[in-house]
Image: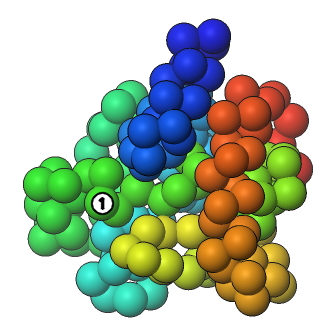
Amino acid sequence: MKTMRMLACAAVLTGASAVAAIAADSVNQVDGVALHGFDPVAYFVQKRPLKGDPEITYQYKGVTYEFYNASNLALFKKSPDKYLPQYGGFCAFAVAAGAKADIDPYAFAINDGKLYVNFSLDKRDRFQKKATENVAKANGNWPKVEPQEKIYR
């Protein structure tokens, strides 16, 4: 755990994506699947959340992701970090406030080519009102929030 904290801090200090330093146990998973089984690529390609097919899966860094179709899976395999949600797929608004919270896969935004998921549409809208400020807060908070056990649902 101490090593993961150091890696997360190093990622923030070097300007690297906070996602790159996330361990599998720091990714929001339900029944062993990230993003509640929604396809991370669909947010970018189809521009909407789409439930993945449990028959089209891929394990990346110990985490299982489901995909809407084989084409999205192929895109993910080429460049997985491009499609991963920020903060391990936990609520971006909550991370900006210093906590972990579950998400509603429909409450999402893409800012500067990065996927942010939130607890609710209201939290998404509040995050987006001050997106630049909230991203900066969440990036700063993530190394402290990442090891937290408590997840608000």
- Above or below 35: residue 141: above
Numbered disc total: 1
Q: Which residue lies at the image location 71% right of the left edge and 72% below the top edge? A: 133
- Observer-nearest residue: 71 or 146? 146
Q: Is residue 52 visible?
A: no
Q: Position of residue 136 (x, y in %)?
A: 65, 61
- Above or below 81: residue 7: above
Q: Position of residue 91 (x, y in %)?
A: 71, 60
Q: Quadrant of residue 135?
A: bottom right
Colour scheme shown: rainbow
Quarter of the N terminus within the rendering: top right
Q: Quadrant of residue 9?
A: top right
Q: Which residue is mark 1?
A: 82
Residue type for callout 1: Lys
Q: Position of residue 72 (x, y in %)?
A: 21, 69
Q: Which residue lies at the image location 53% right of the left edge and 56% below the top edge? A: 86
